[in-house]
C-alpha cells in the first residue's frame, strides 16, 4: 500500500509552497500550509492535490478569545480588572481522496499521522501566506476529529474529517524576525551612524527606538558578544530594567568573540559553551520586560566593553488574526 512520506507538489522556497491563493473564511485570499513536527509541508489550499481544506466549516482564524474579569462598581455597572487571552481552537475540515482505494488509504493514514504526532513530538505549524508575500504562523496540536463521515460511498476513494487543532498561544507570529544591532566602536574616530549606531569610548551602546508592528506585546531574545563583564537592558518609557553580571556566573566574563543568549520568555541565559547563566541576572529586581505594540525607547549598557562588543535583539511580531 503506498504511503505518502513527503508531498512533492510544493516548493518550500516560495511563500505557501507555490500554491495558488484560495479564499478562506475569516482570512480572505491566502495560501495555507500545515507543517508537521518533522518539517514536512502539507498544502491545504491546493485544490488539485489529493487533500485540501474545505471552506465550509473553517473557524478559529480570526481574533483571539478573551476572558474579562471585572469588579462591581458601587454606582452601577462594573470596572474591568483583568483581560486574559485564551488558548485558540481552530476547526479545520479536510477532504482526502485518491485515484483508488489503496492510494486514498495511504493519503488518509499519512495525514492522520502528520496531525496526531504533534501530541508526541511537539507542535506542528499552520502557516498562512498572502499574495503580498507576508507569512504568519501559529503552533498547533491535534485535539480531535480525524474521523470519516461514515456515510455511503465514503472511505473508498474519498472521505472528509473535521479536525480540531489546539493552540496554547492564541497569537499568530510573523515568520520574518525584527533585528536590532548595536556594537562598540573602535578607538579611532568614526561616523556615528556607519555602519551601525556606535560610540568610540563609552559603554552605552546606544539608546534606540524599537518598532513592534504587531498587535500584541512580544518578549525579545538578546545576544551579547564579548568582551563584556555585565550588561544592563532598560526600557526607558517605564524604567523597567534587568542586568546580567557575567562575572557572577560559572562562565565568567565574556572574552572577545564569546556570546551569551538571554531569552525573556521563558527566562533563560545560555553562554556559547552551554553554561547556564540564569543566576547572573539581578534577581529579584530583574524585570525581563516585553515590547508593546508601537514604538518603545530602549537602552543597552555594557561594562567591560571593547572592540567587537555587540548587542543583538530579535523578536517576531505577533498578531490577533491570520
Image (cartoon, rainbow, N blue to C red):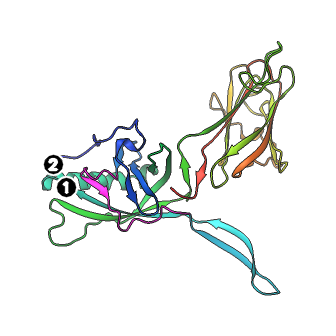
**116 on left or right of 264:** left
Specify start and end residues of the magenta stretch as a single range. Answer: 44-63
**157 on left or right of 254:** left
CB contact under 8 Å: marks 2 and 1: yes
SS category of the residue bearing label 1? helix
- Which residue is at the far left? 100
Q: Residue at x 34, y 45 (%)?
A: 19
- Residue 321 highlighted magenta (yes or no): no
Quadrant assignment, res 235? top right
Residue 13's place in the image compared with 85, above or below, is above
Place of residue 7 in the rendered image (x, y in percent of width and height, measured from the top left): 29, 43
Place of residue 215 in the rendered image (x, y in percent of width and height, measured from the top left): 63, 55
Q: Name the residue that disc number 1 marks.
A: 105
Depth check: 106 or 276 in front?
A: 106
Q: Is residue 268 visible?
A: no
Q: Is residue 15 visible?
A: yes
Q: Residue at x 83, y 51 (%)?
A: 238
Going from N to C along the chain, the mark reached first, 2 or 1, is 2
Q: Which mark is residue 5?
A: none
Q: Name the residue that disc number 2 marks.
A: 1
Amino acid at each position: 500500500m503506498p504511503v505518502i512520506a513527503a508531498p512533492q507538489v510544493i516548493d518550500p522556497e516560495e511563500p505557501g509552497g507555490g500554491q495558488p491563493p484560495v479564499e478562506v473564511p475569516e482570512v480572505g485570499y491566502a495560501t495555507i500550509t500545515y507543517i508537521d513536527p518533522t518539517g514536512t509541508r502539507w498544502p491545504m489550499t491546493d485544490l488539485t492535490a489529493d487533500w485540501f481544506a474545505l471552506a465550509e466549516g473553517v473557524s478559529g482564524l480570526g481574533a483571539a478569545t478573551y476572558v474579562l474579569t471585572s469588579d462591581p462598581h458601587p454606582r452601577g455597572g462594573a470596572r474591568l480588572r483583568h483581560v486574559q487571552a485564551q488558548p485558540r481552537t481552530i476547526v479545520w475540515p479536510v477532504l482526502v481522496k485518491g485515484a483508488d482505494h489503496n492510494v486514498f488509504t495511504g493519503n488518509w493514514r499519512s495525514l492522520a499521522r502528520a496531525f496526531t504526532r504533534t501530541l508526541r513530538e511537539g507542535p506542528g505549524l499552520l502557516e498562512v501566506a498572502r499574495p503580498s508575500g507576508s507569512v504568519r504562523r501559529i503552533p498547533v496540536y491535534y485535539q480531535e476529529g480525524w474521523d470519516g463521515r461514515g456515510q455511503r460511498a465514503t472511505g473508498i476513494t474519498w472521505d472528509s474529517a473535521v479536525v480540531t487543532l489546539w493552540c496554547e498561544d492564541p497569537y499568530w507570529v510573523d515568520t520574518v524576525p525584527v533585528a536590532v544591532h548595536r556594537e562598540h566602536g573602535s578607538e579611532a574616530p568614526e561616523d556615528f551612524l556607519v555602519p551601525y549606531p556606535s560610540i568610540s569610548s563609552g559603554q552605552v551602546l546606544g539608546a534606540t527606538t524599537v518598532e513592534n508592528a504587531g498587535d500584541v506585546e512580544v518578549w525579545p531574545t538578546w545576544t551579547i558578544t564579548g568582551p563584556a563583564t555585565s550588561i544592563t537592558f532598560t526600557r526607558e518609557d517605564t524604567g523597567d530594567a534587568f542586568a546580567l553580571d557575567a562575572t557572577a556566573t560559572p562562565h565568567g566574563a565574556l572574552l572577545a568573540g564569546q556570546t551569551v543568549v538571554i531569552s525573556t520568555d521563558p527566562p533563560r541565559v545560555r553562554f556559547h559553551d552551554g553554561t547556564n547563566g540564569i543566576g547572573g541576572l539581578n534577581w529579584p529586581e530583574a524585570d525581563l520586560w516585553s515590547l508593546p505594540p508601537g514604538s518603545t525607547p530602549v537602552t543597552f549598557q555594557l561594562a567591560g566593553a571593547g572592540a567587537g562588543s555587540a548587542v543583538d535583539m530579535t523578536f517576531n511580531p505577533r498578531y490577533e488574526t491570520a
